[in-house]
Image (tube, grey):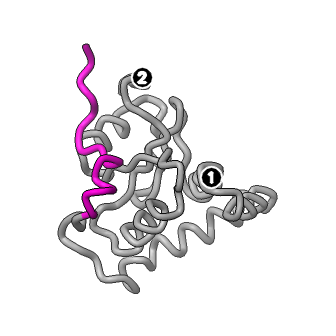
Amino acid sequence: MTEPNTSIPSPLLLYDGQCALCNTAVRFLLRADKDERLLFAPLDSETGRQIRAMEIYPPSAPDSVVLYDNGRIYWYSDALIAILAYLPRSYRWGQVARYIPRFLRDAIYRAVARMRKSFFVSTSSCPTMPPSYRRRFLPSPPKTP
């Protein structure tokens, strides 16, 4: 395991690039994040593998959505709540979910994550994004000088 890499920009959302639900969520976030603060990378990309190799990355983290933010890793429902902080004020009301006990929030998250491939058709590769969004995706970590 390695220490956090300060050359990886954040906030960076790692997602399952072959999951239709995850890809739909990414497309929603690309449109909703008007300030373009969120960056994205598939979990199986070079950036995703580098973050998953960090000491701070828990072995129990899901294979669906993980948020890397300033050297911290958020997963399950905590990742979803943390993502809302980067969206316009009209979406932030969802942060009240943090007052629901984590074990309940995470149980719902895990149930949806288990069923997502049953209800949503998976793809064999990440879908192509419009050119205006492509700069927000990190296929590989930036080179360190």
Q: Which amino acid lies under the numbered mark 2 shown in the image of this protein?
A: Thr
In this view, 13 is above or below 129: above
- Residue 130 belongs to the span the image colors magenta: yes
Query: Does residue 29 appear to the left or right of 2 in the view shown?
Result: right
Crowd class of label 2 (few under 14; some 14 to 19; many from 20; radius 10 Å): few
> Which image quadrant: the N terminus?
top left
Identity of the residue furthest to the top in this view: 145
Residue at mark 1 to residue at mark 2: CA–CA distance: 22 Å
Q: Which amino acid lies under the numbered mark 1 shown in the image of this protein?
A: Asp
Residue at the spot 71% in from the left edge and 57% down from the top edge: 89
Mark linked to residue 6: 2
Instruction: Identify which residue, 46 or 143, lies in the foreground.
Output: 143
Helix, strand, or loop for circle 1? Answer: helix
Crowd class of label 1 (few under 14; some 14 to 19; many from 20; radius 10 Å): some
Residue 44 is situated, as x and y percent measured from the top left of the image, at 26, 51
In this view, 91 is above or below 83: below
Identity of the residue furthest to the left in this view: 124
Residue at the spot 47% in from the left edge and 70% down from the top edge: 113
Helix, strand, or loop for circle 2? Answer: loop
Mark linked to residue 78: 1
- Residue 14 belongs to the span the image colors magenta: no
In this view, 65 is above or below 22: above
> In the picture, residue 50 is in which quadrant?
top left
Residue at the spot 42% in from the left edge and 22% down from the top edge: 6
Residue 54 is situated, as x and y percent measured from the top left of the image, at 39, 31
Q: Tell me the magenta residue range.
A: 129-145
